[in-house]
């Protein structure tokens, strides 16, 4: 009798365990299953193999040396060329500037060069009323990085046109002063492309935010990722069945339930075989493996909320989200902004699958750390602290434990965003645009768009403030994107 009772208890326990596992797997599959975006009778299915997520759960992620890309120094022309996306909603262009010895910028002949597409007008910023620095803030549409990039040797440029749902590709002359559209440019993308990266196997990958400017936010919009194959002349051809639709944002954490997750950046590793997506309002960092045909294979995403109260004590229930990346130039380490905690998240990653392991969060002296630049030698990192209108320098003597060594406060209207150094890393250039209520964007007498240039001390890594050059854009327009040659 006792034996029967014992056997019965064992069987009940096993059934309970199996049911609980089944419930967990079902819940996980429901949360991450293929999404469909419907327009009329058309459907786009998420290209994600859910079953592989658990395949790397036992992977031991060690910190190892990794190769990195070093930008080619210009061989001809004036050098110190800075490209800035003017992001004009009436017709976007690329401004071509040259950095002078004092840090000021001189616009070059033939600038701006039309992209053939359109930017996105800051509707909320233009109409914002002075009721606090975050007054009616349009959080989402303008949180983006790598929306204008050059390839490693500086011969090709990619520009996202957020307002016309396409991407422009230019072939760049040796001196950097002539941008020639690739045949067929611009190329259609998903809705609101905001970030682009070059990956392995002649693959170009575009991240589409699908977060339109303005409030309130419409529910049910899905961001997406799309892959293209690039010809030798720069022409892009969509990879069949490569589009991935991202789930909408979760409810109850300071955002509109079910709206676009408003991803901000896609970034490839140096070998281009792994890419990371910063799913901003989704609260995830999503790794993918690039396959030879250009399609992406998803690795288990990292949920920022899983860090818990020890890392997110203040804003656990309000914006516990990641924003933008930096990749170590020497180790398999990824840095990510935790903007509402004023911290930088530090992760190691598998060089094979991109799977992430949280190491620590380090403090930032500014407010809302958002954008990153990594020095080519791997010794220093620089961040944009948007709301405090400041930038920080970090010592990376131990890449797994960055140490903030300097905070530089900007004075002009607007706040810093995207950042890029000159190829010789003598100058560090920030795009400055109005983001909060600091500047009235509808006042033609107030300039809100700049290139802010600093000098990098090669020995200490600290910054010497030089010059802020106004970009003179029409009122309400907001510059986005920067690259250098």
Image: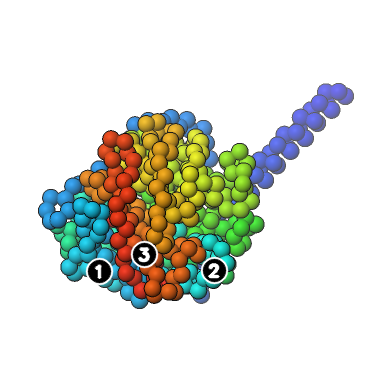
> Which is more N-terminal, label 3 or label 2?
2
Residue 141: x %, y % from top left: 47, 64
Mark 2 and mark 1: Cα distance apart in space: 33 Å
* Label 1 Cα crowd, 10 Å radius (few <14 / some 14-19 / many 20+): some
Q: Residue at x 37, y 31 (%)?
A: 397
Left or right position of 392 against 426: right
> Which labelled disc corresponds to residue 123?
none
- Secondary structure of the residue carrying tag 3 is loop
Mark 1 and mark 3: Cα distance apart in space: 15 Å
Q: Residue at x 38, y 36 (%)?
A: 395
> Which is more N-terminal, label 3 or label 1?
1
Q: Which quadrant holds residue 174?
A: bottom left
Q: Nearer the viewer, residue 203 or 154?
A: 154
- Secondary structure of the residue carrying tag 2 is loop
* Label 3 Cα crowd, 10 Å radius (few <14 / some 14-19 / many 20+): many
Q: Residue furthest top?
A: 2
* Label 2 Cα crowd, 10 Å radius (few <14 / some 14-19 / many 20+): few
Of badges 2 and 1, the one in the foreground is 2
Q: Residue at x 57, y 53 (%)?
A: 319
Residue 82: x %, y % from top left: 25, 57
> Which is more N-terminal, label 1 or label 2?
1
> Which labelled disc corresponds to residue 130?
2
Q: Nearer the viewer, residue 314 or 31?
A: 314
Residue 384: x %, y % from top left: 41, 50
Q: Which residue is mark 1?
A: 112
Q: Which quadrant holds residue 377?
A: top left
> Which labelled disc corresponds to residue 449?
3
């Amino acid at each position: 009798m006792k034996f029967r009772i014992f056997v019965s208890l064992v069987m009940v326990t096993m059934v309970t365990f199996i049911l609980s596992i089944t419930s967990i797997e079902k819940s996980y599959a429901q949360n991450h299953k293929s999404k469909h975006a419907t327009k009329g009778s058309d459907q786009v299915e998420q290209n994600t193999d859910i079953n592989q997520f658990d395949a790397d759960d036992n992977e031991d992620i060690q910190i190892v040396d990794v190769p990195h890309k070093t930008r080619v120094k210009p061989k001809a022309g004036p050098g110190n060329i800075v490209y800035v996306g003017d992001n004009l909603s009436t017709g976007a262009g690329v401004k071509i500037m040259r950095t002078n010895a004092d840090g000021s910028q001189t616009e070059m002949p033939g600038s701006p060069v039309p992209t053939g597409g359109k930017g996105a007008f800051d509707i909320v910023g233009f109409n914002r009323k002075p009721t606090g620095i975050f007054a009616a803030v349009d959080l989402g549409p303008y949180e983006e990085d790598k929306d204008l990039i050059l390839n490693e040797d500086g011969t090709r440029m990619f520009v996202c046109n957020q307002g016309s749902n396409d991407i422009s590709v230019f072939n760049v002359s040796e001196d950097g002063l002539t941008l020639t559209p690739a045949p067929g440019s611009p190329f259609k993308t998903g809705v609101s492309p905001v970030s682009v990266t070059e990956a392995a196997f002649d693959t170009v990958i575009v991240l589409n935010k699908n977060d339109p400017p303005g409030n309130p936010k419409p529910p049910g919009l899905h961001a997406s990722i799309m892959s293209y194959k690039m010809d030798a002349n720069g022409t892009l051809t969509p990879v069949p069945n490569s589009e991935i639709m991202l789930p909408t944002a979760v409810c109850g954490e300071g955002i509109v339930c079910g709206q676009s997750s408003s991803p901000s950046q896609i970034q490839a590793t140096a070998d281009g075989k792994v890419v990371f997506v910063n799913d901003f309002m989704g609260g995830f960092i999503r790794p993918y493996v690039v396959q030879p045909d250009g399609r992406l294979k998803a690795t288990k995403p990292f949920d920022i909320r899983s860090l818990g109260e020890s890392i997110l004590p203040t804003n656990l229930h309000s914006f516990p989200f990641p924003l933008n990346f930096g990749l170590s130039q020497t180790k398999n380490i990824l840095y990510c902004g935790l903007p509402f905690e004023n911290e930088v998240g530090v992760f190691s990653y598998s060089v094979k699958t991109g799977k992430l392991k949280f190491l620590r969060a380090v403090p930032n002296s500014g407010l809302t750390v958002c954008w990153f630049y990594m020095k080519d030698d791997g010794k220093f990192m620089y961040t944009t602290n948007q709301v405090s209108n400041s930038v920080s320098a970090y010592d990376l003597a131990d890449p797994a434990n960055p140490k903030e060594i300097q905070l530089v406060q900007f004075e002009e209207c607007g706040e810093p965003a995207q950042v890029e150094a000159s190829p010789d890393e003598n100058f560090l250039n920030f795009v400055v645009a109005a983001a909060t209520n600091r500047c009235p964007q509808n006042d033609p007498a107030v300039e809100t768009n700049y290139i802010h240039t600093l000098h990098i001390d090669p020995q200490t890594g600290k910054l010497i403030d030089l010059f802020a050059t106004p970009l003179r854009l029409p009122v309400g327009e907001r510059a986005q994107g920067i690259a250098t040659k």
